[in-house]
Amino acid sequence: MIRVMIVDDHPVVREGLRGMLDSEVSVIGEAGSGDEAVVRARDLRPDVILMDLRMPGGDGVGAITRILADRPESRVIVLTTYESDQDIVRAVEAGAAGYLLKDTSRADLLSAIAAAARGETVLSPSVATKLVTRLRAPVADSLSPRETEVLSLVARGLTNAEIGRELFISETTVKTHLLRVFGKLGVSDRTAAVTTALGRGLL
């Protein structure tokens, strides 16, 4: 049987997943944080790990990177409620073999575990759509280093004047950079620019 480890900071979620899966796969252990997952994966040597993303004591992406550096043969499926572009890209870049949402059915989850164990990549339909959309995004969506710098300071709550002082440029130049950012992202204000850039993983 496929040996599975469940990583989630909520005991009730871990218990529910164990009850859902135990008759079809071998749930060999659990962890409640990213740091604990790294230790448990080293000891238990699971075939597939179901990994939550946002947890205290080390997040899922950091745990994926550390686990796969130590045990590259393990396959990690992210199982989360979050599906922002940034979360998806970070998880995939860290080496996740799959990305599923917690509303996935039992049958689909079991199929995904089996597919991951075979070395395949598994994505929920909405996640696959987001990745394809991101890959098809125009090159113009990419911000220059200076535009990214300016928008990062906007995200920190700085005014145009404060950004100018921080970067040793005029307030007019700051406004020019922001107008270019708005055009590239297809937005009309600072808040929307920050939100959109975060969603696309540009910040």
Image (cartoon, rainbow, N blue to C red):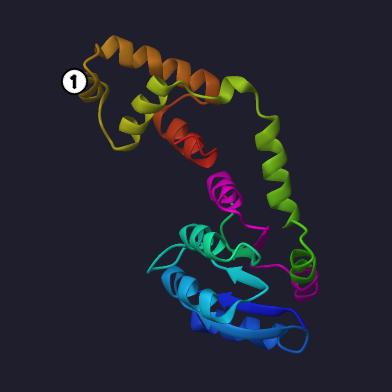
In this rendering, the answer to whether 84 lies above or below 49 is above
Q: Position of 181 compared to 2: left or right? A: left
Would residue 88 be visible to someone looking at this image?
yes
Residue nearest the observer in this picture, 70 or 115: 70
Residue 77 percent across, percent down from the top left: 65, 64
Could you classify mark 1 by the number of other residues whose Cα lies within 10 Å: few (under 14), some (14-19), or many (20 or more)?
A: few
Q: Dividing the image into 4 quarters, which one contains the N terminus?
A: bottom right
Would residue 186 be visible to someone looking at this image?
no
In this rendering, the answer to whether 133 lies above or below 160 is below
Residue nearest the observer in this picture, 43 or 2: 43
Q: Position of 96 compared to 31: left or right? A: right
**Image quarter of residue 41:** bottom right
Residue at position x 66%, y 78% from top? 4
Residue 158 percent across, percent down from the top left: 25, 31
Residue nearest the observer in this picture, 53 or 197: 53
Residue 105 percent across, percent down from the top left: 75, 71
The residue beneath circle 1 is 165
In this rendering, the answer to whether 199 lies above or below 193 is below
Queried whether the magenta region covers residue 87, the answer comes back as: yes
**Image quarter of residue 179:** top left
Queried whether the magenta region covers residue 25, the answer comes back as: no
Residue at position x 50%, y 83% from top? 11
**Image quarter of residue 18:** bottom right
Q: Which residues are magenta?
A: 84-111
Q: Dividing the image into 4 quarters, which one contains the C terminus?
A: top left
In this rendering, the answer to whether 127 lies above or below 165 is below
Residue at position x 68%, y 59% from top? 98
Residue 194 percent across, percent down from the top left: 43, 35
Q: Amino acid at mark 1?
A: Arg
